Image (cartoon, rainbow, N blue to C red):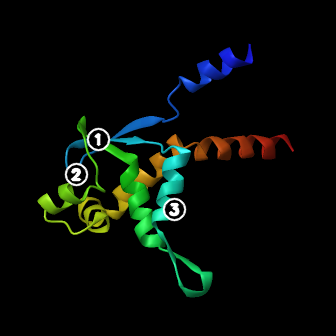
Amino acid sequence: MSQAILGEWLQKDVRRRKKEYFPRVGKEIELASLTWDEQKLLTKEHTIVLGGGKTKFLQEEYTTAWMASHIVAIDGQPINLRDKETLKANGLKDTNEAISRMFTIAEINKILETINEISGSSEEEEIEKVEELKN
């Protein structure tokens, strides 16, 4: 019985998706949550080892890579804003530049809110609010 339940569970896609329309450019962006492994890899990629066993976390680079990793399509066309060839072909040096040139601060906030929503953060906040109201 437990094998069947686990098998059924594993067949479900862990990624949640949501599309957001951006009127400034007239495009719809599809965002997807990350898997645990993708999240761990991003953290590892943006942590450098210093002398003496110390590490430094590159927060700005991580944040833009994290945001870019959630953006999976624009107007239904797959996109990878972390792909060096795609960036270079569009005159961009890196993901940081792509994000800063593509989006306004308000749009970035909208993207971050949606990412938190599809990643389950808003669900947790709602549960906390309900618990607070019960007390």
- Nearest the viewer among 124 and 73 is 73
- Asked whether, in this view, residue 107 is left or right of residue 112, the answer is left
Q: Earlier in the sequence, mark 3 or mark 2?
A: 2
Q: Earlier in the sequence, mark 2 or mark 1?
A: 2
Q: Residues within 10 Å of mark 2 (few under 14, many from 20)?
A: few
* Vertical order, 113 against 74 (above or below): below
CA separation, marks 3 and 2? 32 Å
Q: For the N terminus, which image quadrant?
A: top right
Q: CA distance from mark 2 to mark 1?
A: 17 Å
How packed mark 3 is, by other alpha carbons closer than 10 Å (few <14, some 14-19, many 20 or more), is some
Q: CA distance from mark 1 to mark 3?
A: 23 Å
Query: Residue at the location (24% across, 34% down)?
Result: 76
x and y percentages locating residue 83 in the rendered image: 26, 55
Q: Residue at x 53, y 25 (%)?
A: 12
Residue that carries the numbered disc 1 in the rendered image: 73
Residue highlighted by disc 3 = 43
Mark 2 lies on residue: 24
